[in-house]
Image: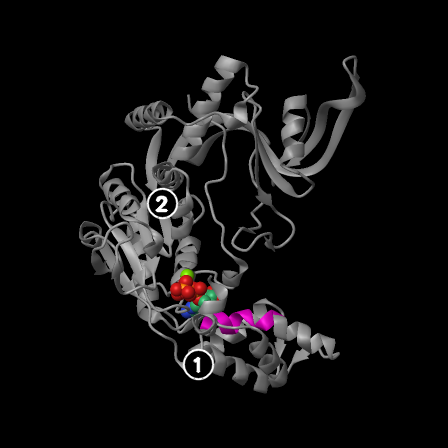
Amino acid sequence: MASEIHVTPVRQLRWSSVHSHIKGLGLDKDGKARKIADGMVGQEEAREAAGLIVEMVKEGRLGGKGVLIVGPSGTGKTAIAVAMARELGEDTPFVAVNGSEVLAAENKAEFLMQALRRAMGVRMRDVREVITGVVTDLKYIKRTSPFYPYPVLGGAKVTLETKDDSGTFTVSPEVAQQLQALSVRKGDVIMVDVETGEVRRLGRVTEKAQRVFDIDVEESIEMPSGKVRSRREIVRTLTLHDIDASLAAQRAAFTIFGFLREEAAITDDVRARADELVKKLREDGKAELVPGILFVDDAHMLDIEAYSYLTKAMESEFAPIIVLATNRGMTTIRGTDEQSPHGMPRDLLDRLLIITTRPYTEDEIREIIKIRADEEEVLLSDDALETITKIGEGRSLRYAVQLLQPAKIVAQRRGSEKVEARDVEEVSKLFADLRTSIEYVEKYKDYLLR
Ligand SMILES: Nc1ncnc2c1ncn2[C@@H]1O[C@H](COP(=O)(O)OP(=O)(O)OP(=O)(O)O)[C@@H](O)[C@H]1O
Ligand SMILES: [Mg+2]
């Protein structure tokens, strides 16, 4: 049964690049925060608390509870969530959504249900006959078709190498298509399931880790050993959502011959079947649940309906760990007139472990700016660094970080690769921070809103 399910990567991340410098929580073996490590600076207590959460998630000891990260704007709440994702390891799902996305969704319950199921991993073990190794040669075979005017893919000839063995194989058009779709090239490590023809790209051995998109760093992996063709235990972690999608597609294929594969709807019925399947696999010792994290940023945007949904989800056996972040204090719960801490209902708050982030000291801000400037390849003079640090302290860190690129452009316009204090001052006059933009709207509200 398990082999019918298509493998897709478990990670589901969409971080803006402003957090690209964060590689982890920067903790030592005892879980103590090092002052500056893994791109993280200060905020020691929150980082250590986050470390404990990661530990508990990995050991499955956080059932029924959630986490709330509270702190003023720009104090690293989102940064800490990114760091937690980095620490969890490859096969623990981490799904990030924003409160406003949930609120804007056409069907909030469906949106949250899908997010929750994407954040639940199912680790499966299976012994399969595979060919695997580093691709050292790959040639596609074209052939002409009586039904089509252009040459079509007729297969491929691929040479694979391990530390101990090598072999050349002629593969079917279906396998060749997957090789193409995955953009497999020399230096990639692949694995092909002999029976199903399913291709997996495991990574690269040659080039160093290459940053593709913010957090999607591709690690270089070790050259495989053993025979190229062999029986291997394959461990793969799918999410509950992957299984839902796969079952829905199979059903659609059955009814309409696969033409609408992509759009196969995931119904309650399909989800019930997926749960059933996972239950069976667990009973047979072939699968285990891997609860991941569903991170809801700007959680104060949620309304009472969404909160009740999440609270209920926390009680279910198949629930991931829910981590919420907010910068709001006492406020009304959206959708009611009731005031509550962080605008969240009491029964939800009762289930949350709360982590707080504090405003940064001047030295911490300076260090963070230095790391960001380095990451964004912005060369700052000492004076420019001081000016940006002051701006970060007086206005907000987030705002200060955002000035780096515009300042670089202004410096380049006057023919300098190095940003000086005056470049920073110039762009800080051009761009408003949040407080200023709110004051601006207040001042001109009679003109802006009619
Ligand atoms: N302790 C830290 N170490 C390194 N970088 C940090 C740290 N805290 C924040 N940053 C960086 O500073 C910027 C602002 O932080 P972030 O967006 O995480 O704040 P936030 O608390 O989520 O703010 P908001 O409430 O406005 O969403 C980001 O670029 C973030 O990566
Ligand atoms: Mg944030």
Instruction: Identify which residue, 129 or 441, lies in the foreground.
Output: 441
Q: Is residue 139 left or right of residue 389?
A: right
Is the distance from the Cβ of mark 1 to the nearest ligand 1 atom less than 8 Å? Answer: no
Query: Disc 2 designates what residue?
Result: 292
Q: Residue furthest bottom?
A: 383
Q: Is residue 328 magenta?
A: no
For image coordinates 56% across by 27% down, the residue present is 198
Part of the protein shown in magenta: 397-405
Rendered position, 412 above or below 448? below
- Indicate which disc residue 140 carries: none
- Residue 345 is at least partly visible in this image: yes
Comes first in the chain, label 1 or label 2: 2
- Residue 98 is at least partly visible in this image: no
Instruction: Identify which residue, 412 or 434, lies in the foreground.
Output: 434
Query: Disc 1 designates what residue?
Result: 394
Q: What amino acid is labelled 2 in the image?
A: Gly
Looking at the picture, how far across and down is residue 163, in whole percent?
Answer: 61, 41
Badge 1: few (under 14), some or many (20 or more) residues near its Cα, within 10 Å?
few
Looking at the picture, how far across and down is residue 38, in whole percent?
Answer: 46, 65
